[in-house]
Image: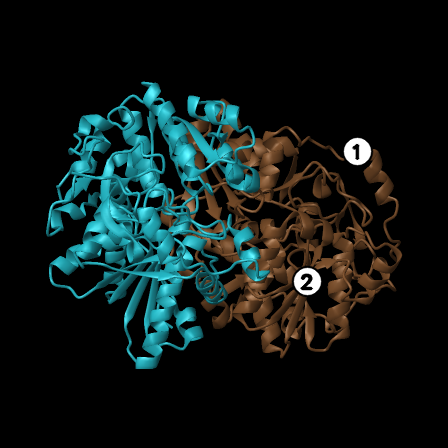
Chain colours: A cyan, B brown
Amino acid sequence: MSQTKFLLDESEIPTHWYNVVADMPNPPTPPLGPDGKPIGPEALTAIFPMSLIEQEVSAERWIAIPEPVREVMRLYRPSPLFRAHRLEAALGTPAKIYYKYEGISPAGSHKVNTAIPQAYYNKLAGIKRLTTETGAGQWGSSIALAGQMFGLEVRVFMVKVSYEQKPFRRSMMQTWGAQVFASPSMETNTGRGILEKDPGNLGSLGIAISEAVEEAASRPDTNYTLGSVLNHVILHQTVIGLEAKKQFEKAGDYPDMIFAPCGGGSNFGGVAFPFLADKAAGKNVRLVAVEPTSCPTLTKGAYAYDFGDSAGFTPLMKMYTLGHDFMPPGIHAGGLRYHGDSPLVSQLYHEGLIEAVAVPQLATFEAGVTFARAEGIIPAPESNHAVAACIAEALRCKESGEAKTLFFNLSGHGHFDMASYDKYFSGQLEDFHYPEEAIKESLAHLPKVG
Amino acid sequence: MSQTKFLLDESEIPTHWYNVVADMPNPPTPPLGPDGKPIGPEALTAIFPMSLIEQEVSAERWIAIPEPVREVMRLYRPSPLFRAHRLEAALGTPAKIYYKYEGISPAGSHKVNTAIPQAYYNKLAGIKRLTTETGAGQWGSSIALAGQMFGLEVRVFMVKVSYEQKPFRRSMMQTWGAQVFASPSMETNTGRGILEKDPGNLGSLGIAISEAVEEAASRPDTNYTLGSVLNHVILHQTVIGLEAKKQFEKAGDYPDMIFAPCGGGSNFGGVAFPFLADKAAGKNVRLVAVEPTSCPTLTKGAYAYDFGDSAGFTPLMKMYTLGHDFMPPGIHAGGLRYHGDSPLVSQLYHEGLIEAVAVPQLATFEAGVTFARAEGIIPAPESNHAVAACIAEALRCKESGEAKTLFFNLSGHGHFDMASYDKYFSGQLEDFHYPEEAIKESLAHLPKVG
């Protein structure tokens, strides 16, 4: 049997991030302020360092990765590219299946790829303390680890219901030295205000964002960090796709189709954008963003200016959105619950350069179990979306007899998500197709622009 | 900065296991039957396949690893050897610290290294079903994964208190298709008998072993599997040390001291025995088994014939033992609770070829947190024993100014042990030095031999 893993040497960790803006047919749409006019970089300096703001608006194709960032990434990068021989055999497909495994990072997902440079640039700017919000804890863990690596204090506002129900992600963050607060907390005006009126409030991602931003905006030594959506976050994730391209060269192969989970978009953008450059140069590669049917942003949303948060504090961004007051259903087990999507991913989807599919929840877990039984690794529920779409394509290939080369991003492991698998096995999960009527209603509340 | 990871190609997965028996100054002591006479291989055929029994008694130096076993190991092997630059800097030590990371396996620890060949040889012998016991679930997970890879049914008897308190390891085993029963269960005479008298019985490892062995012994298509102690189990683990030797060659270095956690002994034997061959050939390398002060088998036990299980069903083995009715204290968070130790490890310790130290619990967690904050990876509590002993030596080097090369086996990650870290952070853990008096008492119950 041919090789299972395609490894790279540490010296092959990318030296530059790839900025897809340089290869987009049209310039990116600008974020707008409350007055409907494009905002300048200075509007963000209260919560982000200038170096990250510059990356956010850059049109340079290649942006150098600082050596101290590559140095920390050597703890887990380059990540392996696997040929899924056993999965292919289990499916009986003529398709060749490859996956890039980002769960190899200490925090267990691709999120660390942007947490490290975000911590680094903040440290460089003299910042002492980072704040962020976290739901299930994947992003919070990543920034806790990265903050520790650069000697920064990290304060994580964790949605109270997760804080209580998922104590292990919390312990993980504490192991790396972060302070974790159940949100709403007594640490901020936002939190105190909510708790005064409603002491039993279980929190939401929206509230946790407000607490983290409030702290960052009100303390000059403190900045805010975000784990997806923004341009600089996607930029940092392109190490995934850049490594994968080198690994496909070693494998003597090239993907016909690439699948990645898509919530805020950094997972998908990180693996797909470097291949989009090839597509622009004439290569025939299909890039498929995979989202849940319970939060079908690209497949059912509108392409419009909307707020990034539910409370409407952020600048307006042009993106596929289900409306900022969209509420993902509680029965949805994995992440990928964001009402909007990265403006870059949205624009490229709007221009027909990438594709999107939505997968119902039970199919994602079924695919995850099939994968785990063949390849060993138990995927994160988010990653299962890509697994499901890739397996579906492999089965289509079985029918058609096509020997396509399929590639997906296994963005994280499921070690902290076994409660979701448990619910799946015990029949407590169900599918949810977000009703068109409800989407229409939340889209009716989109902010008026221009 | 020099290299962080030393990787091997898949072709460098060892082709043979190393059998330390060939290099021992004296032949291994034989196991004895109830009559005090050495038992023959045939006494074990009811629960083990002949190929594994042959390995158990072999004196051949090299035993070929079957190709289908290497094939499955390619999913995660070779495992990386890391140079702990960040830990060295954090400690300010002139010592060079290396660690081999076995947590890279899908089940998260080195245990998979023996689960795969055990499943393979049973499959080859026409066995349809494997049974085993598990406490916290690390071994059960490994055999669940390995059974799935070779199409064997796996039935795991999981100590009821763990089954209820640690549902995530259970879900992991189920993901890989294993059936998991809270032990005592209604599946066996042993279990039913106990539950009839005491319906609320929370189980013990001893009861779970009895259930697993009863099923295996009473069904011709079913065999029993064990995760440590026995010679063939240690044999399979030598892939760790064999790979490490190649990796040290690539690093242009060689360890002065090697540290590994020691419970049943397969973790320690797996990494240390291949280096013992060098020691026999004149190399100056110190091999240190690290055990908990709450279960100080090598450092406080007697070298004597004793039962392998608490009920006294197994053959008698000559080993360091605290007495088969020794009860490890409930406050002990990690594994390494076995009353005895591998007969091979015991004999080599008795003959002065290896060393042993006992580390108190709080020091192991303190070391684990120091390690995680420097190197990212959160170690399993068992692995923390090796981390603690290695850090202590690195700090001695700091005082003496010696630039020793230290190496430890990071046998697994702590993703399923965060509850123990949580207890550590919240001050719920304490040290326990097993009292000499209590050890004397349990040693007074050693079986009479000859």
What amino acid does circle 1 point to? Answer: Pro
- Crowd class of label 1 (few under 14; some 14 to 19; many from 20; radius 10 Å): few
Question: Against A420, is B56 above or below?
Answer: below
Task: Give the image location of residue B352, x and y in percent.
Answer: 66, 44
Q: Chain of mark 1?
A: B
Identity, as a three-letter code, of the amino acid under mark 2: Thr
The residues tagged by marks 1 and 2 sit, at their Cα atoms, a distance apart of 32 Å
Quarter of the image where one finds residue B234: bottom right
Give the mark nearest the N terminus, 1 or 2: 2
Q: Residue at x 58, y 30 (%)?
A: B425
Tell me, for residue A330, which label it has, or none: none
Chain letter, disc 2 residue: B
Asked if residue A434 can be seen in this view, the reply is yes
Picture layout, residue A62 above or below residue A4: above
Taking the spot 38% from the left edge, 30% from the top edge, the residue there is: A210
- Tell me, yes or no, if residue B251 can be seen here: no
Choose top left, top right, bottom left or bottom right for residue A125: top left
Q: Which numbered disc covers residue B435?
A: 1
> Is A315 left or right of A420, judged from the image as shown?
left
Q: Where residue A350 sits in the image (x, y, percent)?
A: 19, 55
Where residue B254 appears, x then y in whole percent?
Answer: 44, 44
- In the rendered image, the quadrant that contains the N terminus of chain A is bottom left
Q: Residue at x 60, y 67 (%)?
A: B118
The residue to which callout 2 is attached is B132
Camera-nearest residue between A165 and A105: A165
